[in-house]
Image (tube, rainbow, N blue to C red):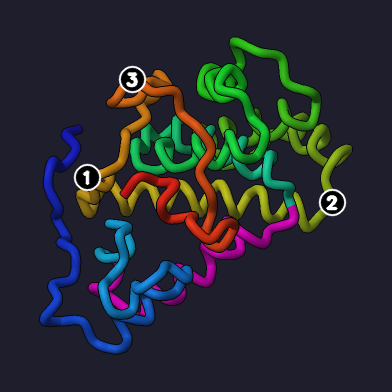
């Protein structure tokens, strides 16, 4: 199946920037977004449908910022889902988040190559198996669930399954709407090589640092 090479749903044009749309731009606390729009392409596309965008953003904030898995565990799940569905946009962004969460590039490569590559501990292996099973079978096997249950609380198990589904849904939207990576970004491929040849480094989630948006390079 071909991937769109241009927006199917475009960024909201300036002449249609209502207050409701500006609330979407500003949701994540991006500097000057209310007046200037967001620098993030997906936000500017979602602003075409403000009511949906605000519900989506509240839901997504839980998984990105507030869920009960720790940050390293979150990024293991998100990176695995991003690779399984070949979401270039999510992969690019979460490599940097993963590095910031303490994952090495070798470990990120092993998340991509699972079950080959580096050895993960039992709880991280169970997270990766759960991602693979959910994507392939729309369920988690009894064996994997039993392993997960030895390490994670009920809240964490619920967050795990919903988070995997959230990032699958987000990847569908990015692909179906034809949303490209931001033009100024130094794109990180699935081979972990950047467009410029530099080594991928840490990037920061909204509000983690004063210059969190600048770390993305756009």
> Tag on residue 183?
1
Q: Residue at x 76, y 52 (%)?
A: 156
Look at mark 2 in the image and give the residue it sits on.
153
Residue 57 lies within the magenta run: yes
**Which portion, as a residue range, is magenta?**
46-68
Residue 6: x %, y % from top left = 12, 47
Instruction: Pick the residue in front: 36 or 64.
Output: 36
Q: Which residue is mark 3?
A: 197
- Mark pair 1, 3: CA separation: 16 Å
Viewer-nearest residue: 96 or 116: 96
Nearer to us in this view, 209 or 38: 209
Q: Relative to 130, is 217 above or below?
A: below
Q: Are marks 2 and 3 in contact (CB under 8 Å)?
A: no
Given residues 205 and 71, the one toward you in this image is 205
Q: Is residue 132 left or right of residue 50?
A: right
Q: Are marks 1 and 3 in contact (CB under 8 Å)?
A: no
């Amino acid at each position: 199946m071909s991937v769109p090479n241009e927006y199917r749903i475009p960024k909201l044009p300036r002449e249609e920037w209502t207050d409701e749309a500006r609330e979407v731009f500003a949701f994540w606390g991006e500097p000057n977004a209310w007046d200037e729009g967001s620098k993030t392409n997906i936000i500017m596309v979602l602003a075409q449908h403000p009511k949906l965008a605000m519900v989506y953003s509240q839901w997504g904030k839980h998984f990105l910022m507030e869920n009960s898995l720790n940050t390293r565990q979150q990024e293991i799940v998100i990176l695995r889902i991003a690779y399984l569905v070949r979401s270039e946009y999510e992969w690019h962004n979460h490599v940097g988040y993963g590095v910031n969460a303490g994952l090495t590039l070798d470990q990120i490569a092993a998340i991509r190559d699972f079950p080959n590559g580096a050895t993960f501990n039992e709880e991280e292996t169970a997270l990766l198996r759960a991602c693979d099973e959910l994507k392939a079978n729309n369920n988690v096997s009894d064996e994997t669930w039993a392993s997960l249950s030895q390490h994670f609380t009920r809240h964490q198990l619920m967050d795990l399954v919903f988070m995997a589904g959230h990032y699958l849904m987000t990847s569908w939207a990015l692909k179906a709407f034809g949303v490209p990576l931001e033009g100024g970004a130094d794109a990180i491929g699935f081979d972990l090589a950047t467009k410029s040849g530099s080594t991928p480094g840490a990037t920061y989630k909204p509000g983690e640092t004063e210059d969190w948006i600048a770390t993305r390079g756009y």
